[in-house]
Image (cartoon, helix red, strand yellow):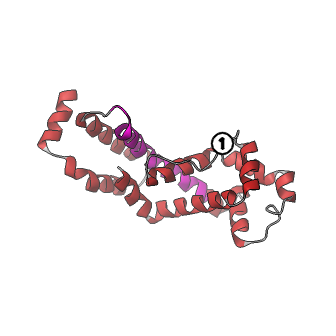
């Protein structure tokens, strides 16, 4: 599962979103004051949280960033932020983060739209990853069925689903044996 997420992250379209989200998060977490101030707007929640695996962490952090988009916008527009040294900062990263959070430019809107698409791609895989890594270990038949549902979910929600399904199949094909097919037949 983690290798599937890693392969997705290697795609330019997905990798750029993850890189941009990481830049936003890193900028905020670089300053203790910014983290503490952000928590006032996010109901004391962080936007960086560890996931099940390294690549699931990308998903969890991106999901949190998108969920708190409005709170971050409110933070960046607040008088306290605007009067702070961070709000007045002229460095390139500060300007870029400010533009992504506050702007309605094509570039900023494109980032948030692509972030939503990446979440639609990662979410079904992360659900299977949570199923596999849970305390109650499911039988192979359940995992097999979960992967089929994952591919269906991706096919329904994303434009380039065939490319993503090919990545899943490349990593998943080693489990397509007669024994595994029998396992799925037993649960149906």
Is residue 158 rendered magenta in the image?
Answer: no
Helix, strand, or loop for circle 1? loop
Is residue 126 rendered magenta in the image?
Answer: yes
**Image height of 90 relative to 144, above or below:** below
Q: Residue extending furthest left?
A: 178
**Residue 10 sits in quarter:** bottom left
Query: The magenta stretch spans which residues?
Result: 110-136
Q: Which residue is painted at 45% across and 44% down in the image? A: 123
Left or right of residue 6, residue 66 in this image: right
Image spot of residue 136 (x, y percent): 34, 31
**Residue 23 sits in quarter:** bottom right
**Image height of 183 relative to 168, above or below:** above
Image spot of residue 137 (x, y percent): 31, 34
Image spot of residue 109 (x, y percent): 63, 57
Q: Is residue 31 visible?
A: yes
Left or right of residue 171, residue 46 in this image: right
Magenta stretch prevailing secondary structure: helix
- Residue at the disc numbered 1: 45
Image spot of residue 184 (x, y percent): 20, 34
Q: Which residue is painted at 84% across and 59% down in the image? A: 84
Left or right of residue 30, residue 78 in this image: right
């Amino acid at each position: 599962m983690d290798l599937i997420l890693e392969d997705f992250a290697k795609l330019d379209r997905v990798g750029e979103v993850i890189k941009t989200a990481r830049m936003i998060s890193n900028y905020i977490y670089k300053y203790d004051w910014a983290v503490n101030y952000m928590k006032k707007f996010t109901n004391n929640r962080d936007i960086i949280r560890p996931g099940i695996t390294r690549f699931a962490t990308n998903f969890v952090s991106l999901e949190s960033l998108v969920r708190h988009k409005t709170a971050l916008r409110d933070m960046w527009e607040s008088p306290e932020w605007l009067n702070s040294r961070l709000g007045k900062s002229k460095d390139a990263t500060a300007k870029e983060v400010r533009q992504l959070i506050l702007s309605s430019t094509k570039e900023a809107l494109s980032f948030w739209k692509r972030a939503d698409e990446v979440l639609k791609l990662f979410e079904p895989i992360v659900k299977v990853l949570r199923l596999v890594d849970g305390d109650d270990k499911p039988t192979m038949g359940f995992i097999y069925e979960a992967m089929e549902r994952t591919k269906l979910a991706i096919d329904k929600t994303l434009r380039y689903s065939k490319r993503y399904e090919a990545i899943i199949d490349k990593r998943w094909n080693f489990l397509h044996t007669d024994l595994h097919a029998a396992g799925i037949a037993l649960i149906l």
